[in-house]
Image (cartoon, rainbow, N blue to C red):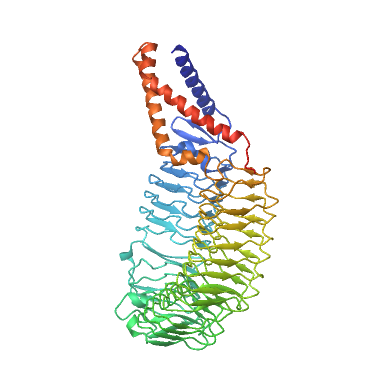
Amino acid sequence: MRIYKSFITFFLLFCFSCVCQTMNADDGVYVVEGDKVIVREGVTEINKEDLEDLRFKNVNIQLPLSLKKIGNDAFCYVKIKSISIPKGVTSIGDGAFQHNPALEKVHLPKGLTTIGKNAFYGCDSLSTINLPESISEIGDSAFYGCRGLEFITIPSSLHSVGTNSFHGCEKINKLVYYDNGRRCYGWIGHEDSCPKDIVIPPGVIAIDEYAFFDANVDHISLPEGLKYIGKYAFSYQLKRTNIPNSVDFIGDGALNCCRYSQPEGTKIDGKSGLLIYANGTKCYNWIGNNDSCPSTLVIPEGITAINGQSFFRFYKLEEVIFPRSLKQIGVNAFAQCKNLKKVVLPNSVEKIEKFAFSYCDVLKDIDIPQNCEYSEGTFAGCDSLNVLLITDHGTVCRGWSSKHYDGLVVIPQGVKTIDSKAFEDCYKIKGVVLPDGLDSIGSMAFKGCSGIEEIYIPNSVRFVGYSAFESCTYLKKVHLPEHLTEILSGMFLYCRSLESVVIPDSVVRIGESAFSHCSRLKSVAIPNQVACIDRFVFSNCTSLEYVKWPSALSDISEYAFENCPKLNKDDIPSSVYVDWDAFGEGTATYLSKHSGEINFVIIIIILYFALFCYLKMVKSYSLKKAIAISLAGFIGIALVCFLLLIAFIEIMIPHGFHG
């Protein structure tokens, strides 16, 4: 016990010494004098790790004149009431003072140019900010949630203000312009304090994103010369506005008020129908509510782009005819148009954004130009649409538009690539015909296509991705191309009906679980260039009886042939290293199968050993008595040691199977 107590005493003294040395170190960025934290003169930059020890502490901080930069999260969670930033500082990093609800006053110096995103996020007590004339950029959400902020100066030098920079500053109540009056940030303040009628003055060329999104404004008059309206710029409460002829960009959702705010929709220029802008080249949406839109919509000639969300959830729409001038259709443009049946796309269309026609349940007829680029999910949920999606001038197949197609899929000539997940979970397709000249099949391209029974992969294919045919549960026969060099992981995983496969001589590697759970596979010839059989490659191939071993084989990895009870292991060359659990018969498998019992034994051992320590050290039992009571504990320890010894012997002693 004396030795034990001496060791504890020494350890505590050592820890105390280390702490004292750390506190007295001369290389820290600050020193503590009374209740004040003084950052050392000569320090030019303060970062998060420099003030880590001050988190959640109430401190007064004095910064040096040498300071040039305040880094990201530097004072995050440091509880300070006021701070004066010295003249030499030019930038305040992202989140530098965020989550400081006690911060009341900040002095920003002349020469400061940048305030990062979230810099003063959640500083509830901050009441006044004077931005210097040198400031040019304020990041996203820089003063977000500063509910106590009542006054702020916006200098003419400011060129960039991020999204939601002053969101939640409910006491300011001010319409803010910047960049020498060229840009309108929008309304800062409580939504109900906003004037009902706002006239944007001449000279403003841009309305920022979310500028009036939360403002209860009825009418906004926009000036001629305006070019840009950011996304979600206007509130759903807006009743009347105008779109100048000079506008060449309107962000998605900027005028959603046209459909949702009033029963008749927002009035724009006193018109109804399609909102056309950018000198007649762009279509924003339909002015008015959904019911006013015709069932057959004709987009006029000259339109080159349709905005995102333009006709989102227009339930009355049944057919859309596009102009020959059209080049682009935006995100969600016609999404969830539940009655849309027919779409006529011209060959001029170059790009369709994601989800543009998603969940158009009854859409059956659409011609997609072969040179058109479109994203994953463009036709998601279009269960009535039976179209093979071909893009990139006929060279890329993106799959079938519907998961419920139940016929034969014939990939046309000219297709070079089948995209990843192209036919994933198309469980009803009966078969696939691949064209000569095909170069590659993407990962999981036919995963879950349980209706396919046979597939011929042409010899032109040089790459097949991982899990390409995983869970094709009725696949019986497959022809692999003669130039294939790798069978990647999971390629035929869970192909339970696969009876035979010829692996081409060009293959040099077979990945993990490539043929795992192929329960009807009886024999396989592994090419001579394969040097290692990876983990789980043929695991659970319960019918596997014969393997032709490659001449270059040197290793068989763990679990490679786990649960292959019929496999003859006697003909494995003696030079091959066989992992101790390659066939799922080693100690690791045993331990994993009996982990519950082993854990129980370990718990019993711990309890017995704890009992012994308690009896000997606390109750001061005699050694003989303590040993007698806790003898079972030692027996358990001996048992565990015995099992570990067996495992050690199997790992350390090389062994192989040979005839």
Asked if 580 appears above or below 460 in the picture, the reply is above
The answer to which image quadrant residue 579 occupies is top right
Q: Tell me: 415 left or right of 35.
A: right
Q: Position of residue 225 (x, y in %)?
A: 50, 78
Residue drawn 51% across and 87% down? 323
Q: Position of residue 15 (x, y in %)?
A: 50, 24
Front in this rendered view, residue 194 or 437: 437
Front in this rendered view, residue 619 or 8: 619
Q: Position of residue 117 (x, y in %)?
A: 49, 55
Q: Position of residue 477 (x, y in %)?
A: 56, 67
Q: Is residue 289 in view from this perspective?
A: no
Asked if 83 appears above or below 475 in the picture, the reply is above
For the image shown, how many numbered marks are present on the structure? 0
> Quarter holding the C terminus?
top right
Front in this rendered view, residue 247 or 288: 288
Residue drawn 67% across and 60% down? 485
Q: Which residue is farthest left?
A: 263
